[in-house]
Amino acid sequence: MTDSVKDRVIAIIAEQAVLEVPDVKPEATLEELGIDSLGLVESIFAIEEAFDISVPFNANDPSESDFDISSVAAIIAAVEGLVAEQKG
């Protein structure tokens, strides 16, 4: 299960960044991948749709959000948490 969340999140981010999946490393930041604020919002929407979750994300002030977007790995962990919460 965990691998599929990771794989799907990486695939979504790769699609938004117009990169190949192997080029999206967990330690990479969205900025390093070339994802701007619009790409971030589109990524969040795609993640919400893919996992049927609601991401508590404030696009106007990401630092105020409980959803950590500091790196690909942080996004994966946050999505895993939301998926687990939803199932719980």
Image (cartoon, rainbow, N blue to C red):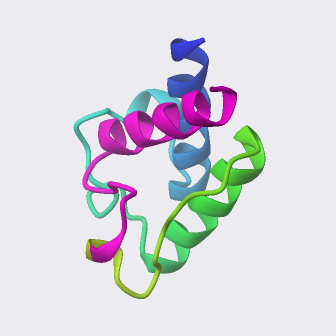
Task: Report the number of numbered marks.
Answer: 0
Against 56, residue 25 (above or below) is above
- Residue visible at 37% across and 64% down in the picture: 34
Residue 27, how many percent across, how many down? Answer: 22, 37
Against 4, residue 42 (above or below) is below
In the picture, measured across the screen, residue 70 lies left or right of residue 80, that is: left
Is 22 in the magenta? no
| Placement of the N terminus among the 4 image quadrants | top right
Secondary structure of the magenta portion, mostly?
helix
User: Which residue is at the far front?
Assistant: 88
User: Which residue is at the far bottom?
Assistant: 60
Q: Quadrant of residue 52?
A: top right
**What segment is highlighted magenta in the picture?**
64-88
Residue 69, how many percent across, how many down? Answer: 34, 56
Q: Nearer the viewer, residue 61 or 43?
A: 61
Against 62, residue 30 (above or below) is above
| Placement of the C terminus among the 4 image quadrants | top right
